[in-house]
Amino acid sequence: MPKNRQGNNKLGPAAEASANANLADDADINDQHVVLNAIASLKQDLLAKIEEKAIAQSAELQIQTTQIWTELRSVVEQVNKRIEVTEGRVSEREAAVSSHSDSITCMTSDVTGMKKELATLRDRCEDLEARSRRCNIRIIGVGEGREHGKHPSQFVADMLRVSLGLDKPPTLDRAHRALRSRATQDGLPPQAFIVKCHYLSEKESLLKKAKEMKSVTTPDGDQIRLLPDFTQALSKQRAAFTEVRGLLRSCEGVRYGLKYPAILMITTSGGHEASFSDPKLAKEFVLNKVVRKAS
């Protein structure tokens, strides 16, 4: 017995140390369990709070989404209404444009017809005015005031009888000065006399007689010219042949004349006859067929 006690006494410190170590390990394990439990509890708390916040945010997000959808739906409805109104207006405008297009087409056709009719009426008026002047003579160069105190028709008839050497005065229906202001400055030509003969044949004979005389002088000493009384438009048409007539004057054996209203008649030296109402065509004919052949 005493020996065993001594042996136990010898192993006591080591066993005590081992026991202390075991106790320390158990304490560490207990501490770990406590920490793990604390972590698990904290995790649960965090998860609960996260879930709570997530639920709250989800609810708030759903509310906001609902509000946004409501606003968007309202805006879309307004836009749709405006689109419907716009489509209605566009349809009205399309119908109006279609109607206007038809009206414009009709008016274009009407205007085209009116233009043709206007051109025809203008030509007829021009022809009527020109024909109403066919018995007229324009006398240029009679001094201002020569007819003072006399009847214009009688004055002109006596002047023509003496100036042209006629057996009797021509029969005149009327005579008057041209309708423009009287020449008051030196160097300005006097107003022309417009004379209407009673007979066309007598008017033609007066013009022919004046052309044969080349220079006609009145008893008062005025140098006068007798010309047909054409309208302004007809005068321009006839004046357009002036250049061609100048070319024809230098061509020997060529006869030409300006026929009423404005038709140039040409007879070449070879007997070929041609007529032109276009001055350009007449000039080409003269240069190619008359002047070149003569040269």
Image (cartoon, rainbow, N blue to C red):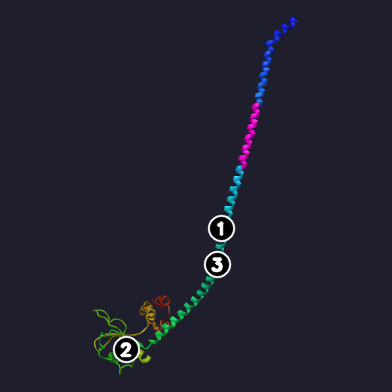
Q: Name the residue that disc number 2 marks.
A: 175
Q: CA distance from mark 2 to mark 3?
A: 67 Å
Which residues lie in the magenta part?
A: 34-55
Q: CA distance from mark 2 to mark 1?
A: 85 Å
Q: Is residue 198 left or right of residue 116?
A: left
Q: Earlier in the sequence, mark 3 or mark 1?
A: 1
Please, what is the three-letter code of the amino acid marked with disc 1? Gln
Give the percent coordinates (x, y) of residue 278. Answer: 43, 78
Q: Secondary structure at mark 1?
A: helix
**Which is in the foreground here, disc 3 or disc 1?**
1
Q: Name the residue that disc number 1 marks.
A: 78
Viewer-nearest residue: 89 or 232: 89
Q: Name the residue that disc number 3 marks.
A: 92
Quadrant into which the N terminus falls:
top right
Give the percent coordinates (x, y) of residue 15. Answer: 69, 13
Whether residue 52 is in magenta: the answer is: yes
Please, what is the three-letter code of the amino acid marked with disc 2? Ala
For the residues bearing labels 2 and 1, Cβ distance under 8 angstroms: no
Q: Earlier in the sequence, mark 2 or mark 3?
A: 3
Q: Residue furthest top?
A: 2
